[in-house]
Each structure stands twice: as C-alpha cells, then as structure tokens.
Amino acid sequence: MPESPRGTRLPTSAPVPGSAPAPGPASVPGPASVPRTAPAAVVALLALLAALVGWTALRASASPAGAVYEAESAALSGGAAVATDHTGYSGAGFVGGYTDGNKGSAATTFSVTAASAGGYVSTLRYANGTTAPQTLSVYVNGARLTQISLPATADWNTWNTFATPVTLTAGGDTIAYRFDSTDSGNVNLDDITLTAAPAPPGGQYEAESAALSGGAAVAADHTGFTGAGFVGGYTDGNKGSAATTFSVTAASAGSTPVTLRYANGTTTTRTLSVYVNGTKAVTTSLPATADWNTWGTVTENLTLKAGANTVAYRFDSTDNGNVNLDNITVGSTTTTPPTTPPPGNGQTYDAATAFFTGGPSVATSISGYSGSGYLTGFTAQGAQTQIDTAVPSAGAYTVSVGYANSTGSAQTLSLYLNGIKDSRLSLPAGSGWRSVSASVTLRSGLNLIGLQHDSGDTGDVAVDGVTIDGGTALATRGATLPYTEYRAADATTNGTVLPAGRAYPSLASEATGRSAVQLTGTGKYVQITLTKPADSVVVRYSIPDTSDGSAITAPLTLYAGGSKVTDLTLTNKYSWLYGDGYHDTNSPAGGSGHHFYDDVRYRNSGTWPAGTVLKLQKDSTAGGTYTIDTVDTELVDAAYAMPAGYVSAADYGVTPGGDVTSALNSALSRLSGTGQGLWLPAGTYGISGRVNLSDVSLRGAGPWYTTVQSTAENGDGGLYATGGRNQIADLSIFGDHTFRNNDQGAPTIEGAFASGSLVLDVWLEHAKVGLWAVPATGLDAAGLRVRDIFADGVHLHGGSTGSRVEQSDVRNTGDDNIALDTEGGDVTACTVSHNTVQSPIQANGIGVYGGGNNVVEDNAVSDTVAFGSGITVSTAFGQNFSGPTTVRDNLLLRTGSHNGNWNSDIGALWIFADAKGDITQPVNVTGNTIKDSSYQAVLLSFGHTISNLTLDHDTIDGAGTYGFDINNVTGAMTVSNTTVSGTGSAALNNPGGYTVNRGPGNSGF
C-alpha cells in the first residue's frame, strides 16, 4: 500500500510491577515505572562481563560489512534506556524507552566515524512487535534528516533492519534516532551498521536521498527498490503538501528526459505535479503497476538549465497521489529543437480541461503532456475541441498546437478561431510530443481556439493544448471578462453611500457588494478613474418607480475629464417588479417591490486613456433619486467583418431599422444545411415574433454593433433553434419583457442544439430567460453577458448531455443564474466552468437538479439576494441523481439568503434533498472558498437522506450563523482538510446527530 509516515499504532499499557515482560517495547526503570525483573546489580554485572569480552566498549566493531555501533553504548536521553528483557539482540543489551510516555524526548545518539566526507548508509537493527509500522526521526549532526517508517516484526524477540542514506563529514559525526512529537515510536533499538553508500548509476538519483517534506518519508516495507529504500507518504492525508525534491545536474541547458521509477498498486492511474527549479512544469500521470512490489517508469521531457537544478514531485491539491517513489534518472539534454518549436514567452492552454464533443476524451497514457492530460479520439468527422485562450489586444498572434502522432504519416485537423474555420493543419508524424504553428488574427480578450475533424481530415492524433505567443492567463475563478467593473460605493462621490445591508427587499440587498450610491439631487455625482483605456460604459442603476408602475425615462449625464460626453437614458421599464416572483407585474398594488436595477450602455467615438476621470452626475430634476451600483468600462474591438463562408443578410432583404422577422426567418431557412452562415452587419434589427434556426449559423459584427431587438412586449420575440448544429455569435439580443410570468413570454435564445453547436459572445437582456436549451447535446455556450433577466439566466433542460457553460457573466436574474434541470429527462456530463455569477434575486447562483457526472468548477458566485444559495445540489425539481456531482474550486462570496416563504435561512452551499428523494449518489465538494456567507456556509436539508457527500480542502471564512448546519437529514458525510473560521453562531450545528466522518487536516470545527 502507499506508505504513510504515521501507521496505525496499538496502545502500550503501563507495566505492572512484578509482572512478566510485556509483549511490547521495553519499559525501563525510571520515574514513571518500577523495575519488573532483574535488579540493578544484575544489569551492572552484564555490562561488566561485556566490557571484559571487549566488544561493547565505547568503540565500534569493525567488519567487512561496515562498522557496527551498539545502541547500549550510545548517548541515551529523554527516557531511552538499556534493557535486556527480550532475546536475539547483539552486544550487551538493546535500547528501549520509546514508549508514549517519552514521546517528544526519547533519543539514541550514536557517535560515528566517517573515513571521508560523502554518502553513507546507516542500517538500524530494531524490533517492533506492535503489529503495525512505527516511525522515528533521524538526525545527522543535530539536523533532522527524515522520518523513517519501521515495519512490524514477528514479535519483540525478532529483529529486522532498516537502511537510511546519510551524508557525513570526514571524521566524527552523530546519527540520532529520536521519538519526535510527530512520530509513533514504540520500538526497540539494537545497533546500527555504517557502510559507504554505493554509487548509483550515472544520472540516477535515489528518492530516499532527496529532500522530503509535507509527510513524504523514507520506507522499505516493499521489495524491488534500488538504493536503501523508497519514499512513501503520498497519501490522502498529505494531499497538498507531500513532496520529494531532487537536486540534479545537467551538462547543458535544454529539454531533458527525466524518468521516474515508481510503484502504484492502487489499480488506477495516479497523478503528481512536477516542478523544475520551483516552477510547475507538468502533471505526470502514473499508470497502475501490478502491485506495490512492482515498479514502473514514466519519462517527462523537462527543460533544465546547465548545472544545478531541482526537480520536485509534489502531491498538489489537484493531484490524486497515492504512489511510492524509488528514483529518477536524468538523461542527456536535447539541444536540437523539435520540428516546429512553440514560440518563447507563450501562454499555454490545456486541452484536457477544455470543451470537447463528437468523439474526443481525456487520456493520460502518453507521458510528457503539459497539463492535466490530453485529448484523443479525433478520428470521426465532427470530433472537436474548443480551447479557451486570451490575448491582451486584437491583432496577429502565433498559435502553436501541441500534439502527438505515432501513426507514421502526417495527419490533418482543421483550425477554427471563435467558431470560424481558419485553415487545415498538417501534423507530421514523429516520436513524443510535437508542435505545429500558425499565424492567426485574434480578437481582444477571450478567444476559442478550435480543432475539428472536418470532411477530408484524418484526425488520428492526440492534442495536448495550444500555446499563444503573447497570450495572457485566464482568470483562475470566474470568467475572463472584457471589461473592468467599478463599484460606486468604492468610488469618489458627493452623494449618499447606502449602508451595507442584506435585508430583502431593499436597494442595498440587490447591489453589488450590498451597497450603492444615491444621487439625491442635482449636482450630485459619483466618479471613477480609469485604470485601463476604455471607449464604453455600462452603468447599473435604479430610479424610483411611478405610483402606477408606468414607464418613464430620466437623464444621467456622463462627463469625461470634466467635459460632458452625453446623457444616458435611464428607465424604470424593466425594473420594479411586484408579486411572488413567479407571476409578477409592474403594478405597485401587486405587493412588495424587488428587481430594482437595470443597465444602460454607451459606446464613445474615441478612446479615453487610463487615468481619465469619468463622472456620472444628476443634472436634471427628473426621475427623483438615482441609485448607482456599478460602472463597467471596456475598450471595444472594431466591428468584425463578414467572415468567409457567410452571406450578408442584406442580400436577403434583412436590413436594420424595421421589423425583419419574416425576412430573417426566410434567409435562415434558405441557408439551413448548406454550410453557409448568415451575417448581420452593424445595426439594430427589430423582431416581433419567433426567429427559427435549423442547422445554420447566425453572426453579427459584435455585441456592441449588431443588436436584435424584440418589439413584442412580453411576447415571443427571440431566436428558436429547431434542431441541428446551430451557431449564434457576436451580437446582442434584447427582449422587451417588463416582468416575469411563467405562463407567457420567451427567452432570447431557446431550442434544441446538436453536437458542435456554439453560442459565443452574445449579450442577452430583458427577457424571460437568457438561454433555454431543450436539450443541449454537445453545446458550448461561452463568453455570454446575460443581464436583467426575469427567470433563469442560462438553463440546460432535461436531455442535455456533454454541454458546457463557460467564461460568461450572468447578473441580475429573477431565478437561477445558471441551472442544470432534469425536468423532462436526465442531464449528464455537463460542465459549468469559469463563470462570474452575480445577484440572483429569488433563487440560486448555480443550481444542479439531479443528473449525473456533472461538474461545477472555478466559478465566482456573489451576492445572492433572496430565496436561494450560491450553489445548490438539489432534488427539488425534475429527476433524482443518476451519477456523481462535482463542485470544485469555486468562490462563493456573500451568498446564501433568507427564504421569507419558509421563514428559514439558506446556506451559501446548499445540499437539498427534497421532493424527488434522497441524495445517495456521490457529491464531491473540493477546493471551494466560501466567504462572508449571509447565514450558513454549508446547509444540509431537508427530511431525507444525504449520503456519499465528501468535502475536502474547502475553506469557510466567515458565516452569519453556522459553518455547517445539518437540518433534519440522515446519512453521513466525510470532511477532510477543511477550515472553518469567523462563524457568527458555531462552526457546526448538528442537533439530529447526523454522522460526520472527520478525515485528516480539519480545523475550526
């Protein structure tokens, strides 16, 4: 099994005066014990006889196998003492006293002599009759070297040996075996034998001689290792910390094969992270070996500098570890570059974590990949991946594709940029990982680099990822957004800053960060200083409603550098709803108001440089008090030209300025299935009803330039996909909904999407729903801006599979911002990744309602207003769970809320077993940060069983009430490596006695 530096240990009972010797470590006369058998005179006589024989004086015996140093002749301290009450020892006795009462102090220090400075092996002879491995710490010349794990022996009269490599100075040295506070002790020591360490083969570095940390420790309780032992301790309890760091030498700089010898008896492939000179180079994948006594090798090509380097194998939080390490071998540096080398100073983006559909799958069997794995399976036509990348500005870039091709002949894949075919790549055959480059034109910010098997392609390659020379890193959590957001409450103002508050309904509770600025009269302003150049603004605001709910407008003046730019037109038309949230109206007679905020956008004719002061000022008496929440500023790319393979809508009579519903439907119908797409030039296109798409693409000049505007107030104006592979990109779709009514209205985009469909860079506002996919099969929805929606922002409905919602911002929705909903069928293998999710008013930030193998990862969710959580895993709707659900590496900030209908609080993370039954499929919650929760950080409810729930490496930092609140559920959960701090009530509330299995590494609860 994988080695743990701390094995299971049997308790040692206190000795009973006058009793027979206990079957355990020797108990030695001292303050806490009474002599059990021989009087002190007998011990003295034995020592005298040994001295007369001349073998155990204060010197080591010489033998061809090395110098032997008896433990009873060493310096003993901390309770360690000479004993003779077991048999089979050498010399005049052995050393015991390594009992629990002496933990942290017992030590045996040998004074040894080294003929010359260098490597030696200290082989300890010991007995361990506890039946479990026990640990001690080894010190050389007073410095701690390592922790060793000593396997059990048959009984206390049976002795075994354990070898530890040590580095000594010429002349006198000390080697100490100490029972430190982190050790389990409970062993007896007989002697050590010191021998010169055999020189390993050239380029080979033994793991037991490397620098060990984080729980990694030397062990020898399996066979077949080289040197004096191997390194274990890569167990789950040391996840995130265990590391073995080799100091190696390279003759010259360049790509160098480094081969790890390891054992993996888990039966599944395991991973570790490889660091070179302190920087992560690759995640290495270690296939299973036959058992723990069988060793395998994996080679990674690492870039080393000439001379000294460090190569570390770490058990990072993203790895699954549980392997043993024997050695590494550093081969010859390759100075000849690969066929087409990737450019320097590039940013690499991993294919294994990207969207894929139509055949590819993640694999790890080819060693040397750069990320968490690679994609294989591009042999079928339609197989594709879309890899998220980013660049700082629009322009020409070099994109390199990392691939492996062992077929013996060149293969081809088609290169796509943001869903548009760019070229066909030829991928020559060869050994190992290779790369091929292309010069391309990219837009600023997010770009999707696609690789697809088109007609005429061969596709029999593995894809590792892409590298962009001059690319920028994607956001770690949340979306990589094209704009910079400024909170009014943090800006300069002579207005009134609302006190932060979360009580619903209120303007503060719906504001970003729970505070905003009010401009109560003329001359009142709020201003920001640009940190980046910009030519556009989006202002999130609220103006008071009218007494009858009728729509009005009011001006807000925008100044740049002290000069007036324009009046922004504010309105109450799409805000101020009244009712229960499901059948709202705009009439104040309908109940308490909510959904207070709306957005207004403006694009300037010129660019404001960084440092420009933008001021929003109330210069008119109209509209009463204005409330300003946020200002988003952006430097917008020039309008996109019509791409190859598209036809202008003008050719079909579709022109801006009027109602184009009929003409647009006709144009899309004629292009359906032809392979040609329809391009909408810049302008605003009115639609009064449904626009159908079937196996066709619709694109605009960019969401700031091309707008499809519904003119059907609270009606059916929107796009509807009736089937096939559809693409909708680079435009805005604005509805004309003014309230939520479940019985009428339409999404901006709705319908069925087949594998390979794409919705990209689309801005959606003022609709019942933003995107409602029924179902989504292999759909990638990326780069969306979904704002001011009255129900769900993005909804993947029953029957959806293999789809992804990513790199999108969803703000100010009346229901879930993003939902995976099994009503109407199962939802499987869908991913919600890297989204910025803000201010859901009457539901959850992200909701997973049943399904299986779905993942919610790397999202930033903030400011839940009412009736919901940040993230919920729930059986409230649809079907039950058919497989595991993973919630990992998300940030939940100021989430959770109060449900006034139930008069109950809802946690930031809510595991909700409700109407559709128990939750018994695995729910894995790992690596999340849950911060400043309004009420509970984690809530389990209600009235059903929740089992197979695991939390690992999660951080709870601040909660209004409890860290964990377990409310009327049965079952069990396991919590490991989780920290709870800053709770208002208690870290754990578990009145029903729900089973909480506490793993290692927890604190605060």
Image (tube, rainbow, N blue to C red):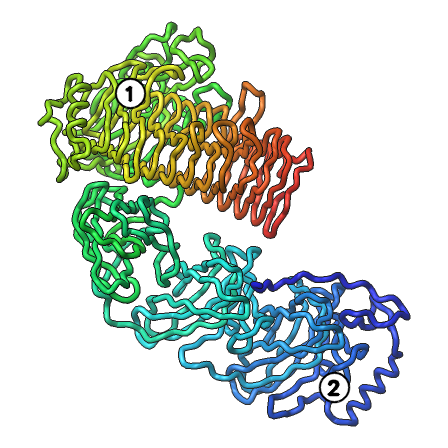
Split into 4 quadrants, where in the image is the C terminus? top right
Q: Is residue 598 left or right of residue 38?
A: left
| Residue 655 placement: quadrant | top left
Q: Amino acid at mark 1?
A: Gly
Crowd around label 1: few <14 · some 14–19 · many ≥20 (10 Å): many
Does the CB distance between marks 2 and 1 fall below 8 Å? no
- Please identify, in this view, whether the residue under mark 2 or under mark 1 is nearer the observer: 1
| Residue 665 placement: quadrant | top left
Query: Does the rendering let one see residue 719?
Result: yes
Residue placed at 35% from the left, 29% from the top? 774
Q: Secondary structure at mark 2?
A: loop
Query: Does the rendering let one see residue 521?
Result: no
Residue placed at 75% from the left, 82% from the top? 88
Q: Is residue 249 left or right of residue 867?
A: left
Q: Which residue is mark 1?
A: 735
What whole-number distance in Å separates the C-alpha atoms at marks 2 and 1?
Answer: 92 Å
Q: Which mark is residue 340?
A: none
Residue 505 image point, x, y percent: 47, 19
Q: Residue furthest right?
A: 18
Q: Which residue is mark 2?
A: 91
Split into 4 quadrants, where in the image is the N terminus? bottom right
